[in-house]
Image (cartoon, rainbow, N blue to C red):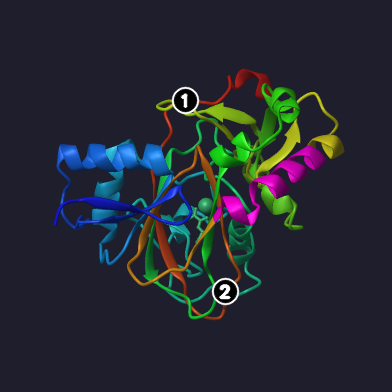
Amino acid sequence: MPLAIRQLQKHFVGEVSGLDLRKPLTKEQAQEVEAAMDKYAVLVFHGQDITDEQQMAFALNFGEREEARGGTVVKQADYRLTTGLNDVSNLGKDGKVLARDSRAALFNLGNWLWHSDSSFRPIPAKFSLLSARVVNPKGGNTEFADMRAAYDALDDETKAEIENMICEHSLMYSRGSLGFLDYTDEEKEMFKPVLQRLVRTHPVHGRKSLYLSSHAGAIKGMSVPEGRLLLRDLNEHATQPEFVYVHKWKLHDLVMWDNRQTMHRVRRYDQSQPRDMRRATVAGTAPTVAQEAAE
Ligand code: OGA
Ligand code: MN
């Protein structure tokens, strides 16, 4: 069966068929998937019963692996996954569901806020590829917002106002907004804010998008409350239902998204039951803004 892509009702999502992700892609197939990512921004693959190694190999068609370090309060020695994938599950190293009040579980709750992966890194992530290994029995949909369409729908005055704005992003802002405020000195150093443009331009097709994320906690040159209010307004605008696709997971779905042109969040689920989601992250290639000014 040849590779085919069906556009879903939400136009920024394509459903891919005719690919077996257990096998290496041909160069042509990889190019077709990448071109589809540029066109759609989210791609859905069903029925992909893959190993961690196969998932990583598929991701590496699109760039380098992004280091997981610096994105979690879990120490490397306590990682459940040692294959280079990001652990987005609610499971501990022993494979059991994390205690609801454990630090790791509380930190992971940040994924319930709208965000773009690794916007807290100087060079933020390009693509994320999330594979459903155990689907939670209740809830746990993942929602995606099209930040190109959200940008396009802004009025001209707002577009001009925000064009050159620079935001500070940190994991301490997203978690802090949930009341998770205690960090070790080592974590404070690791989670130091980085700078990101508020409007970014896609390197291939040149469309602009709003680069929002729960990690954004300040806008340069503005008071913190004013900056946060503007970010809140923009988030409210960008996550209106018309811009949002809701993915209801089936076992062995793989969903791939472009962090440069979308935001996402997971919805409430039954935290007493397992939800095993594993993410391969493709590194970005350039900062959105020079980082020196962050110091
Ligand atoms: C992620 C993420 C949401 C989910 O993998 O980056 O935010 O549905 N996941 O688990
Ligand atoms: Mn995420």
- Residue 284, compared with residue 234, is above or below; it is above
- Residue 286, compared with residue 141, is above or below; it is above
Disc 1 residue lies near ligand 2 with CB under 8 A? no
Residue 295, visible in the rendered structure = no
**Are the residues flagged by discs 1 and 2 in contact, CB closer than 8 Å?**
no
SS under mark 2: loop
Q: Quadrant of residue 219?
A: top right
Please name which of the two marks, 1 or 2, marks the residue nearer to the observer: 1
Q: Which residues are magenta?
A: 228-244
Q: Identify residue type, mark 1.
A: Gly
Q: Identify residue type, mark 2.
A: Tyr
Residue 244, visible in the rendered structure = yes
Residue 37 screen position, x and y as percent: 37, 42
**How much space separates mark 1 and mark 2, taking CA atoms?**
37 Å
In the foreground, 179 or 34: 34
- Within the magenta stretch, is there residue 239? yes
Mark 2 is surrounded, within 10 Å at the Cα level, by few (under 14), some (14 to 19) or many (20 or more) other residues, namely some
Residue 189 screen position, x and y as percent: 64, 38
In the foreground, 194 or 73: 194
Instruction: Look at mark 1 in the image and give the residue it sits on.
Output: 206
From the viewer's perspective, tell me whether residue 147 is left or right of residue 94: right
Instruction: Look at mark 2 in the image and give the residue it sits on.
Output: 269
Q: How many labels, in total?
A: 2
Q: Main secondary structure of the magenta part?
A: helix
Task: Name the residue at 23% across, 41% down.
Answer: 30
From the viewer's perspective, tell me whether residue 165 is left or right of residue 62: right
From the viewer's perspective, tell me whether residue 102 is left or right of residue 140: right
